[in-house]
C-alpha cells in the first residue's frame, strides 16, 4: 500500500489524545490535510524528530508516536538504543520503510541491507511489531482496541510502497503557533490518555481515622475481595 | 573558581532548570559528580543532536532544560541549533572549552571564567527564555571545582 494510505489508516486507529510527530516534508504534506492540535510537523532538521518525541514522552503520560522514514533512522542509528534505555512505556516510533530515499530521487537506503531489521531493533531492548505492505484498511480497523492498550517503548515497522501522493496542499504552519499549540495540548491533563491508569494510593495517603472498617468488612463478606 | 555544587544549586533552585541531557565531556566531570537527583533529571544522550532533541521535547512538556556538551562541536553551533531557532524553543547549552571570550554568536552567550558565574547564567537564561532562542554558557578550562 502507498504510504499516504497506510499512515492515514494508522492515524485513524490511534487515540485522540496521543501526540503525533511527523518528520520530513513529503510525509508532513501527506497528513496535513487532516491537521489537528496534537500534530507536530518537522519539515527539515533531519534526525531531531525522534529525540524530540522521546523528550516529550519522558515528561508526560500521553502516548507519543513519531513517524519517520527508514532513511532518517539511518542518520541517527543510536536513537534506537536511546529509546530502549529510556523504558518509556508511552514512546512509539513508527518506521515507514519504503526502501529508498524517496524525496531524493528514490535511490536505495542501506537499511535494506540489514540481515534482520527486527533483530536489530530487539537488540536495543525495544519491542517491535511489523506490518507488511499487504495490510489493508479493514485489518487496521480490527486492531483499534488492541492498539489502545499498546505498551512501549516500541518500534512499529511498516513496509510501504515507493511513491509520493501528488497534488497535496503545501504546509502552511507558523512555527511559533505550532509550538504553543502542541505544548498546550501536552500540558492539558484534563483529557485522559489511552494509557491512563488511576494512581494507586500508598498507605501513607490513606487517612485511617476516616475509614469505616465495619462497612469494609461487610462489603468484603458480601462481594468478596 | 566555580564550585559544581553551587553551579547546580543556582541553576536548579534559582532558575528552575530541571531536565538535562548531554554527552560525556571530561572537562565537565565535576558537574557530573555533583548531580543531585532530587533537584534534576539527567539523561546521558548518544550524541549532541539527540541531547538537543530530548531537552527540546521536555520543554514542550513544561520543563526548562539544559544540554551539557564539549565545545569542540561549536564550529557548527549555528546549524546545530536550527531546529530550536526555527521553532523558537529555548534551551540552555552548557559548554566546556577554550573558546575565545571575544567570539560572539547571534544568540545569548557568556563565557564563565570566574566566580561571577551566577550573574552571567541569569543573563543568558533570562534572554533565552524571553527571546525563545537557545542560550550558551561556556565554562573555561580549569575553572570548575
Image: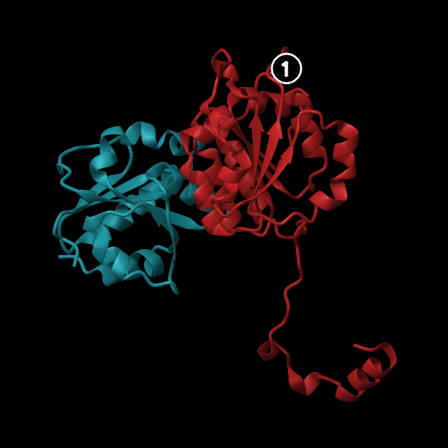
Q: Nearer the viewer, residue B95 or A160?
A: A160
In the image, the chain rendered in cyan is B
Residue A119 position in % (x across, y down): 52, 39
Whether residue B42 is visible:
yes
Residue at the front extreme of this rendering: A115
- Give left or right: position of A13 versus A220: left
Residue shown at 33% from the left, 46% from the top: B22
Disc 1, SS:
loop
Residue shown at 22% from the left, 39% from the top: B71
Q: Nearer the viewer, residue A38 or A201?
A: A201
Is A151 rendered above or below residue A102? below
Q: Quadrant of residue A157?
A: top right
- Give left or right: position of A136 versus B102: right
In the image, the chain rendered in red is A
Image quarter (top left, top right, bottom left or bottom right) of the C terminus of chain B: bottom left
Q: Nearer the viewer, residue A161 or A28?
A: A161
Residue B122 position in % (x across, y down): 28, 50
Residue shown at 56% from the left, 26% from the top: A97
Whether residue B59 is visible:
no
Is B144 rendered above or below residue B137? below
Callout 1: chain: A
Residue shown at 52% from the left, 16% from the top: A102
Q: Residues within 10 Å of mark 1 (few under 14, many from 20)?
A: few
Q: Which residue is tagged 1?
A: A165
Q: Total marks drawn?
A: 1
Q: How is the image coloured?
A: by chain
Residue A225 position in % (x across, y down): 78, 77
- Give left or right: position of A215 versus A78: right
Is A45 rendered above or below residue B25? above
Amino acid at each position: 500500500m502507498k504510504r499516504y494510505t497506510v499512515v492515514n489508516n494508522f492515524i485513524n486507529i490511534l487515540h485522540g489524545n496521543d501526540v503525533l510527530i511527523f518528520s520530513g516534508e513529503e510525509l508532513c504534506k501527506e497528513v496535513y490535510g487532516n491537521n489537528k492540535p496534537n500534530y507536530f510537523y518537522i519539515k527539515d532538521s533531519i534526525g531531531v524528530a525522534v529525540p524530540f518525541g522521546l523528550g516529550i514522552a519522558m515528561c508526560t503520560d500521553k502516548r507519543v508516536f513519531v513517524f519517520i522514514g527508514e532513511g532518517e533512522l539511518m542518520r541517527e542509528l543510536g536513537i534506537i538504543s536511546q529509546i530502549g534505555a529510556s523504558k518509556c512505556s508511552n514512546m512509539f516510533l513508527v518506521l515507514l520503510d519504503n526502501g529508498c530515499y524517496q524525496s531524493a530521487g528514490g535511490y536505495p537506503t542501506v537499511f535494506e541491507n540489514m540481515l534482520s531489521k527486527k533483530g536489530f531493533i530487539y537488540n536495543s531492548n525495544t519491542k517491535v511489531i511489523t506490518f507488511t505492505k499487504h495490510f489493508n484498511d479493514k485489518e487496521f480497523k480490527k486492531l483499534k482496541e488492541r492498539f489502545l492498550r499498546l505498551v512501549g517503548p516500541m518500534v512499529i515497522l511498516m513496509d510501504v510502497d515507493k511513491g509520493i501522493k501528488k497534488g497535496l496542499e503545501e504546509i502552511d504552519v507558523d512555527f511559533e503557533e505550532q509550538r504553543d499549540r502542541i505544548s498546550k495540548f501536552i500540558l492539558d491533563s484534563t483529557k485522559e490518555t489511552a494509557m491512563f491508569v488511576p494512581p494507586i494510593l500508598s498507605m501513607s495517603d490513606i487517612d485511617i481515622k476516616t475509614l469505616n472498617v465495619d462497612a469494609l468488612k461487610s462489603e468484603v463478606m458480601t462481594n468478596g475481595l | 573558581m566555580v564550585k559544581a555544587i553551587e553551579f547546580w544549586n543556582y541553576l536548579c533552585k534559582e532558575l528552575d532548570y530541571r531536565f538535562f541531557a548531554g554527552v560525556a565531556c571530561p572537562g565537565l566531570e565535576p558537574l557530573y559528580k555533583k548531580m543531585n537527583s532530587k533537584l534534576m533529571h539527567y539523561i546521558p544522550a548518544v550524541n549532541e543532536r539527540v541531547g538537543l532533541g530530548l531537552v527540546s521535547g521536555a520543554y514542550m512538556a513544561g520543563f526548562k532544560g539544559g544540554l551539557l556538551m564539549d565545545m569542540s562541536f561549536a564550529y557548527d553551533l549555528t546549524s546545530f541549533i536550527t531546529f530550536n531557532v526555527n521553532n523558537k524553543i529555548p534551551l540552555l547549552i552548557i559548554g566546556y572549552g577554550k573558546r575565545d571570550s571575544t567570539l560572539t554568536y547571534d544568540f545569548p552567550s557568556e563565557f564563565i571564567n570566574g566566580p561571577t558565574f551566577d550573574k552571567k547564567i541569569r543573563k543568558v537564561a533570562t534572554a533565552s527564555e524571553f527571546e525563545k532562542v537557545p542560550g550558551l554558557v561556556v565554562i573555561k578550562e580549569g575553572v570548575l571545582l
